[in-house]
Image (cartoon, rainbow, N blue to C red):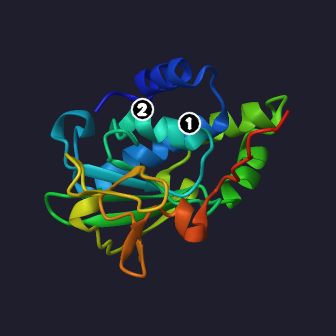
């Protein structure tokens, strides 16, 4: 795995700037890979990461691990927590790693000579030991074959809108396959065309 400094450079380029959340995400990714026994995640292809927040740390985790939504190796669960679960698909070993809120206070105490909160956090997140930045625990994750990387395992068409639905994400209502939106679980609302 690359050094922290090399990863910081890559993260800044990929994200567009460098911030404390990215450094925390990089450190989280390095720790998570080590815990599950993945030494070079970009080459080994045996890692899935489940993230719990859509913030800067998640972009940094992608830099460390090479995991991406489009590769189906990055899973997003919107819990609003700076946390991620690392799964070694070869061994089944999984760890959930959570950022400690106390590290923010510690950053202010240890680096009080730095002018801004951002500077203090960036310095702390680069140098504090893992146990001061994170808590972690071994967990079990049940991934179905439809959740794993690779080609879609199934494809059906929604009986209402006709759109294709991959990997058993459809809902069966009265014996008919429906996409989640047509089954009443849309994250969007359709606006009817205006009548002139």
Q: Nearer the viewer, residue 125 or 175?
A: 175
Q: Quadrant of the C terminus?
A: top right
Q: Identify the residue under disc 2.
A: 63
* Label whose residue precedes the other's in the sequence (1 or 2): 1
Q: Quadrant of residue 39?
A: top left
Secondary structure under tag 1 reads helix
Classify 55 as above or below 186: above
Residue 110 got which mark?
Answer: none
Secondary structure under tag 2 reads helix
Residue 91: image location, x then y, percent: 15, 63
Q: Identify the residue under disc 1.
A: 23
Q: How many marks?
A: 2
Give neighbour class at mark 1: few <14, some 14-19, many 20+ (Cα, 10 Å).
many
Q: Quadrant of the N terminus?
A: top left
Task: Report whether 6 appears left or right of 82.
Answer: left
Residue 95: image location, x then y, percent: 36, 65
Residue furthest to the bottom: 174
Classify 106 as above or below 43: below
């Amino acid at each position: 795995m690359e050094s922290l400094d090399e990863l910081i450079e890559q993260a800044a380029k990929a994200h567009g700037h460098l911030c404390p959340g990215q450094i925390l995400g990089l450190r989280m990714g390095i720790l998570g890979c080590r815990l599950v026994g993945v030494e070079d995640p970009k080459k080994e292809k045996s890692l899935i990461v489940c993230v719990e927040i859509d913030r800067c740390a998640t972009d940094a985790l992608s830099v460390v691990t090479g995991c991406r939504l489009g590769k189906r190796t990055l899973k997003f669960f919107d819990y609003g927590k700076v946390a991620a679960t690392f799964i070694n698909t070869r061994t089944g070993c999984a760890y959930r790693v959570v950022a400690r809120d106390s590290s923010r206070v510690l950053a202010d105490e240890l680096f009080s000579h730095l002018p801004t909160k951002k500077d203090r956090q960036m310095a702390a997140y680069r140098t504090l030991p893992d146990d001061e930045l994170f808590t972690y625990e071994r967990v079990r994750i049940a991934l179905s074959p439809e959740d794993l990387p690779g080609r879609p395992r199934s494809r059906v068409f929604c009986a209402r809108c006709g759109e294709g639905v991959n990997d058993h994400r459809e809902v069966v209502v009265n014996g008919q396959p429906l996409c989640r939106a047509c089954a009443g679980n849309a994250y969007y609302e359709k606006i009817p065309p205006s009548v002139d």
